[in-house]
Image (spheres, rainbow, N blue to C red):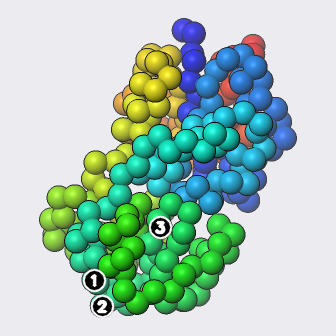
């Protein structure tokens, strides 16, 4: 098969556990570009959180951010697609989070907001090299457009919150844990898979010409749009069951090794 699109998740896939990308992997991706293969990234991160990674490359990279709520291009800065939260539902969720004293951030493209500077929020903001803006009234931000709400808490509290939000039956919102300590809240009409389909249509690339590699549940929607589905060795068993190939772990340069195996044998 002549593959024309290679899409990778970031955390737990392209990046090792220290959030680094190896020089060997960077070189392999540059060779993909030379081979006329479109390289794209798909992540739950905000654009600010991927800047350091995509700056390693001189060519334009389609970037799926906020798990599909925003698609931008790295060099031309084209806003390909965006889908924000329904304002009233977003405000109801924020009210609940404040009432129950959860730590959370609200993302609007490049800006991050919170109602308090808890240790969890400070740690999260530092990780993405940003500072959370403290606000008491989220109404103006909700009207401008919220791309994602992220809640950070202990695992049992995340599970409890997810059940509570699901019982409130928000038709416009989806809730899912991106890790044991994070719950992500996005528009129900967005996913990495929907965003991938938009990229495929934009560049006239078919699913059969697409390779997807990932390690988490939010990557499964992309698997449905790919001719070749690859899971990382460090992925949960449920993810591996949906994959055609299992790559080496993210700490063993799994993405680099799979690129070489498929394209440069």
Q: Please name whichever residue, 4 or 255, is drawn nearer the observer in this view of the structure.
A: 4
Position of residue 21 measured from the top left corner of the image (x, y, whole percent)? 76, 47
- In the shown orientation, is residue 56 left or right of residue 54? right
Q: Secondary structure at mark 1?
A: helix
The residue beneath circle 2 is 99
Pointer 2 or 3: first along the chain: 2
Is residue 192 depicted above or below 148 in this figure?
above
The residue beneath circle 1 is 96
Q: Secondary structure at mark 2?
A: helix
Q: 10 Å neighbourhood of mark 2: few (<14), some, or many (≥20)?
A: few
Position of residue 81 measured from the top left corner of the image (x, y, whole percent)? 42, 43
| Tag shown at residue 107 | 3
Residue at (65, 72) in percent of width and height: 130
Quarter of the image where the C terminus is located: top right
Contact, CB < 8 Å: mark 1 with mark 2?
yes
Contact, CB < 8 Å: mark 3 with mark 1?
no
Quarter of the image where the N terminus is located: top right
Q: Please name whichever residue, 158 or 3, is drawn nearer the observer in this view of the structure.
A: 3
Is residue 67 visible in the rendered image? The answer is: no
Q: Quadrant of residue 226?
A: top left
Is residue 62 visible in the rendered image? The answer is: yes
Determine the CA span between mark 1 and mark 2: 5 Å
Contact, CB < 8 Å: mark 2 with mark 3?
no
Is residue 48 depicted above or below 239 in this figure?
below
Q: Quadrant of residue 167?
A: bottom left
Position of residue 179 measured from the top left corner of the image (x, y, whole percent)? 48, 62
Determine the CA span between mark 3 and mark 1: 17 Å
Residue at (31, 56) in percent of width and height: 187
Pointer 3 or 1: first along the chain: 1
């Amino acid at each position: 098969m002549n593959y024309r699109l290679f899409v990778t998740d970031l955390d737990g896939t392209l990046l090792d556990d220290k959030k680094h990308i190896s020089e060997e992997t960077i070189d392999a991706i540059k060779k993909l570009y030379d081979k006329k293969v479109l390289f794209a990234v798909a992540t739950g991160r905000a654009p600010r959180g991927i800047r350091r990674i995509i700056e390693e490359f001189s060519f334009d990279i389609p970037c799926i951010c906020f798990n599909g709520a925003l698609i931008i291009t790295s060099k031309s800065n084209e806003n390909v697609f965006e889908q924000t939260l329904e304002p009233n539902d977003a405000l109801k969720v924020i009210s609940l989070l404040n009432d129950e004293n959860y730590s959370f951030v609200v993302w609007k493209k490049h800006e991050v907001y919170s109602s308090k500077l808890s240790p969890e929020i400070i740690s999260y903001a530092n990780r993405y090299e940003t500072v959370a803006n403290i606000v008491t009234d989220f109404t103006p931000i909700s009207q401008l457009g919220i791309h994602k709400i992220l809640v950070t808490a202990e695992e049992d509290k995340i599970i409890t919150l997810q059940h509570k939000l699901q019982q409130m039956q928000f038709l416009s919102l989806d809730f899912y844990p991106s890790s044991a300590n994070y719950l992500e809240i996005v528009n129900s009409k967005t996913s990495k898979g929907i965003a991938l389909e938009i990229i495929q249509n934009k560049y006239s690339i078919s699913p059969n010409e697409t390779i997807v590699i990932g390690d988490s549940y939010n990557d499964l929607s992309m698997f449905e749009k790919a001719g070749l589905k690859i899971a990382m060795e460090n992925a949960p068993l449920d993810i591996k069951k949906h994959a055609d190939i299992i790559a080496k772990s993210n700490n063993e340069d799994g993405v680099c090794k799979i690129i070489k195996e498929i394209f440069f044998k």
